[in-house]
Image (spheres, grey):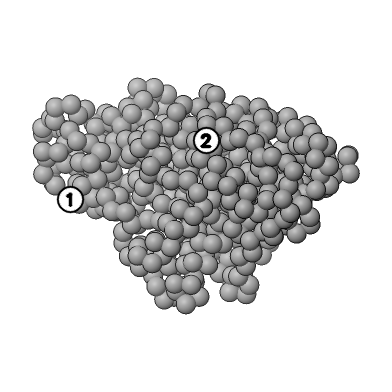
Amino acid sequence: MQLIWLRSDLRVHDNTALVAACERGPALALWLASPGQWKDHDDAPCKVDFWLRNLRELKDALAHYNIPLLVRHAEHWSSAPQVIHEVCREHDVQDVHVNEEYGINEARRDRAVGELLQRHDITLHSHLDQLLFKPGTVLTKSGGYFKVFTQFRKVCYQRLHHALPPLQRLPRKQAKSTIDSDEIPASIKGFAQTPDTLREQWPAGEDHARKRLKNFVDDLMADYPVTRDLPAVDGTSQLSPYLAAGVISVRQCLHAALASNHGEFESGNPGAVSWINELLWREFYKHVLAGYPRVSRHRAFRPATEAVQWRDAPSDLEAWQQGRTGVPIVDAAMRQLLATGWMHNRLRMVVAMFLSKNLLIDWREGERFFMRHLIDGDLAANNGGWQWSASTGTDSVPYFRVFNPVSQSQRFDSKGRFLKHWLPELQDLDERDVHSPGGLFAVKGYPQPIVDLGRSRQRAIEAFRQLPKDSEEVEPDRDY
């Protein structure tokens, strides 16, 4: 008997470990509920609910291939080896198949599982699935992991031109099993109920994910270079929750983009090129996670920036978390996150830079808050994005470049449509004043700005200037 241990790969199509298990013989699937571990990782209730909803869809899909789906409880990953071994003993499993994961805790878990199984003559097979390239195979000329995305992307392009990672075929249908599938829990204790409105925004199932991919490629991708920055427009794929949970694969996304662009990576449809770059950013941060384990421990990628003197400002942090800073684009973005479990990518950069630079609050506070609310919460992407904005990470924005949130708002939401949708108290303001209420006039029910943007920007620059010389060697330039 073969066992496929499902984690962030909740799909039947293009699932490497699932196909490998079915090729070797009769197979069954296993999923572990680990609420204690999820709490330690700050996984959002809406993300856990998304897993459960997708598992219910996956259970039906697996049933078509006569593959039972078992659910077991392992409060923390430290108990995963024993739980998995017990399943193997109960069902006479000879091989366990997993798709690789790359956080430091994930690596330790899989190593412990493999060691215990090996002692009982059971083999753990790890498969590349979550990424296009195995970490450790896309390296600099000196043999190290890349620290700069553009250099990483160049090598990825070369590799993809040479050999495009193929899509996996569907698993082989097996004889009807005598093993019954388990019921998927409706909820997990300790994780709050997800509102129906949020569930409706993020329907479960790979059929929906594949349809969403097709609609994006067919109807939206051509305009992506422009619309991707406009939060009032549905101009992005909004596939990130499905990619994070593995309901759709990066290979499926890449093949779809290339098919619409005559197989071109760097020319042709600018929308396809731009979106493929976003897929490679996702890839890059996963490689960073594997190559520099300190980021899994919430350490700054650039060690010198650990010396930044962050402010201890609980009231400012709370105002940011609640969308009550008095800076409309920041508040609208945070309210979008609280209501939908998702935030537009341009706005993720804006609110991250506002917290880490204008408020000079430790980026880890923001990283943690995002993970506790994002339906697409992913350690590598979330950490990479936050460290980029805070100027502590790989390929990060220079410390002296601080987004002006008002300018960002005027540029990317010029009519104020996004602002007025999430901040109804500003409905009566015109498209000029809606970006920066406060100061000359007040709006009932909306707070005054909690910080002066100009002075706070300078405060952040001075804080970073005091770091050791090797942390930044270029002179400040203008705000942007």
Residue at the spot 38% in from the left edge and 42% down from the top edge: 200
Residue denoted by label 2:
48
Q: Is residue 122 left or right of residue 141?
A: right
Query: Is residue 6 among the parts visible in the rendering?
Result: yes
Query: Is residue 292 among the parts visible in the rendering?
Result: no
- As drawn, 52 above or below 314: below
- Please state which amino acid type lies under the numbered disc 2: Val
- Please state which amino acid type lies under the numbered disc 1: Lys
Residue at the spot 14% in from the left edge and 47% down from the top edge: 431
* Nearer to me, 223 or 212: 212
Residue 117, numbered label: none
Q: Is residue 266 left or right of residue 41?
A: left
**Residue 337, x across and y down, in percent:** 37, 38
Residue denoted by label 1:
415
Quadrant of the image occupied by residue 456? top left
Mark 1 or mark 2, whichever is nearer to me: 2
**Residue 139, x across and y down, in percent:** 65, 61
At label 2, counting other C-alpha atoms closer than 10 Å, the crowd grade (few under 14, some 14-19, many 20 or more) is: many
Q: Secondary structure at mark 1?
A: loop
**Residue 22, x across and y down, in percent:** 73, 56
Alpha carbons under labels 1 and 2: distance apart: 36 Å
Residue at the spot 41% in from the left edge and 76% down from the top edge: 268
Q: Is residue 57 left or right of residue 476?
A: right
* Nearer to me, 63 or 142: 63
At label 1, counting other C-alpha atoms closer than 10 Å, the crowd grade (few under 14, some 14-19, many 20 or more) is: some
